[in-house]
Image (tube, rainbow, N blue to C red):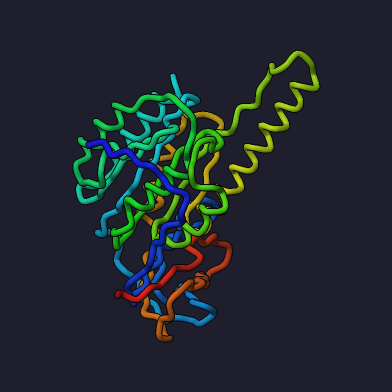
Amino acid sequence: MVAAFIIQPQIPLFRATTEIVQVDVYVARGGRAVLGLGASDFELFEDGVLQELDLVDAQNIPVHIALVLDTSSSVAGLGLSHLRDAAIQLMNDLNDEDEAALISFSHHLKRTAELTRDKNRVRAAINAVEAKGATAWHDALFVGLKTLENVEHRPMVLLFTDGMDTYSWLREEQMLPLVEQSQAVIYAISRKERLPMELGRGHLARDRARRAARSANAKRTRLLRKLTKTSGGRFIETDTTENLGPIFSAILAEMKTRYLLSYQPREPIREGWHRLEVKVKIRGVDVHARRGYFYEKKR
């Protein structure tokens, strides 16, 4: 089944509706996961208040992945072949209980595979994607988050894009609230924008085009870094699509080594935004965890 979407420019709300809060945390040193930590190695503050933590055994908890892939015309040719191969390898790396969905995007969005344990269905959808059209990754990320809206444990978006957004309804300033109100961890991979070499008849025209492309690439990179960091994920930039396979596999391995912290807030939960800060009681490590969550009482 292929689902097509028309995105309206309102900001939809993603809400936490449980009084037990769970936070995925990745701890690394020198780019490698730090394993073997216990609950006592972590400190988590909600709105500045230290919480009493439990560490959930996450090894047997399935991962739920919304795979959001850029299939605009800039990916045509070898880029699309590399992207398909990487996505197929990701399906091969998943466990039987893990779930995946596929959202492909150009100027149209297609959820060509709903969230499912049937990896063959997702593989077939991956093999069927074609590259053409403009880029609407803002809207596509929204659909990825929406796909995971009802997933309680370990939701993850893996987004690949190689161009500036040129076609979305959703504007740049609307993206951060969407991410803040979702429970999904977001990993984003972007191919660096290729600067134009021969545009116009003179040096001035060529230099203007290169400066514009460089500025657009920097703007996209800043936004992707902000969104992924807010969710507790990471942004990865690559020069080529040839290494997408190892990147996808490394992201999945990283997701499966993340710690899952659970706690019941000490204070009665008020509705609205709650700021989170996660610390680890060992030196020299990098900690990646989402920055907060929204809470709304069940009506």
Which residue is drawn at the image coordinates 43% and 77% (left, top)?
271
Q: In which quarter of the image is the C terminus?
A: bottom left
Q: Can residue 40 be spotted in the picture?
A: yes
Please identify the residue farthest to the bottom as the structure is shown.
267
Rendered location of residue 221, percent (x, y):
59, 43
Q: Determine the image quadrant of residue 88.
A: top left
Which residue is drawn at the image coordinates 26% and 39% (left, top)?
113
Rendered location of residue 241, percent (x, y):
48, 29
Judging depth in this view, the residue of 287 and 172 nearest the camera is 172
Q: In this view, does 105 lie above or below 57?
A: above
Rendered location of residue 243, percent (x, y):
46, 32
Which residue is drawn at the image coordinates 45% and 38% (left, top)?
160
Which residue is drawn at the image coordinates 26% and 59% (left, top)?
61
From the viewer's perspective, tell me whether residue 125 is left or right of residue 73: left
Q: Quadrant of the N terminus?
A: top left
From the viewer's perspective, tell me whether residue 284 is left or right of residue 12: right
